[in-house]
Amino acid sequence: MVSGIDALGLMGIFREKPRTKASNALARILTMHDMSEMSYEEGISRSRRQDFPRPVALGVMVIPCGRETKAADVNYLHAVPGVTCDLRREGIGVLLPHNLKGDHFLVAIPDTEEVWRFFGCECRHNSPRPGGWWQLGLHVEWLAEPESNQMADFRSRLGRFFD
């Protein structure tokens, strides 16, 4: 038997939307970095909840994927290293040493405890920068949770760049 609320289909309004879930996860990472770099005397800024870009440089991994690619089909062995040039609650600016073509990417970002979080993003711009670098402007759409075999592939790829 379905309860009155479920019969009306109202339970869905209490579920967190994918974009909101991803945005909140990215905000938590931003907060961790803001708090770890804040001096004790500085205290908490009144503007801490505003959505302005923060020039946070973090090593990230960028994984090309298609708009319709299912999370289980993403190939984590295609991850390439990049560096964030700015972060905001719903967006990530990433610098890459070469042009990475595509409309959608997963961006793996480590938090302050070295736990990797994976954000599905739509590419809003892919712009050349001096010195042969490229900047991806990415809008956060969803939070990905890789399967165990995908995490093994991801860690293998990390080892290729950082061991």
Image (cartoon, rainbow, N blue to C red):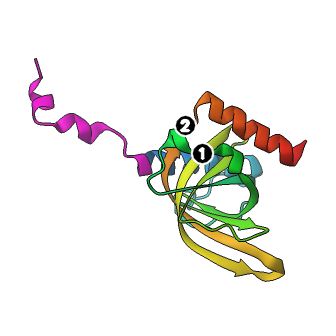
Among the two numbered marks 1 and 2 on one chain, the one whose residue lies closer to the N terminus? 1
Instruction: Report the amino acid beneath label 2.
Output: Glu
Q: Are marks 1 and 2 in contact (CB under 8 Å)?
A: yes
Q: Residue beneath label 2, please?
A: 145
Q: Residue at x 75, y 66 (%)?
A: 96
Q: Residue beneath label 1, please?
A: 118
The range drawn in magenta is: 1-19
- SS at mark 2? loop
| Residue 50 image point, x, y percent | 52, 62
- Distance from disc 1 to disc 2, alpha carbons, whole Å, reads 7 Å
- Residue 84, quarter of the rendered image: bottom right
Crowdedness near tag 2: few (<14), some (14–19) or many (≥20) residues, C-alpha within 10 Å: few
Q: Residue at x 57, y 67 (%)?
A: 52
* Residue that sits furthest to the right in the current view: 163
Q: How many marks?
A: 2
| Residue 9 appears anywhere in the view | yes
Say whether residue 4 is magenta.
Answer: yes
Say whether residue 23 is magenta.
Answer: no
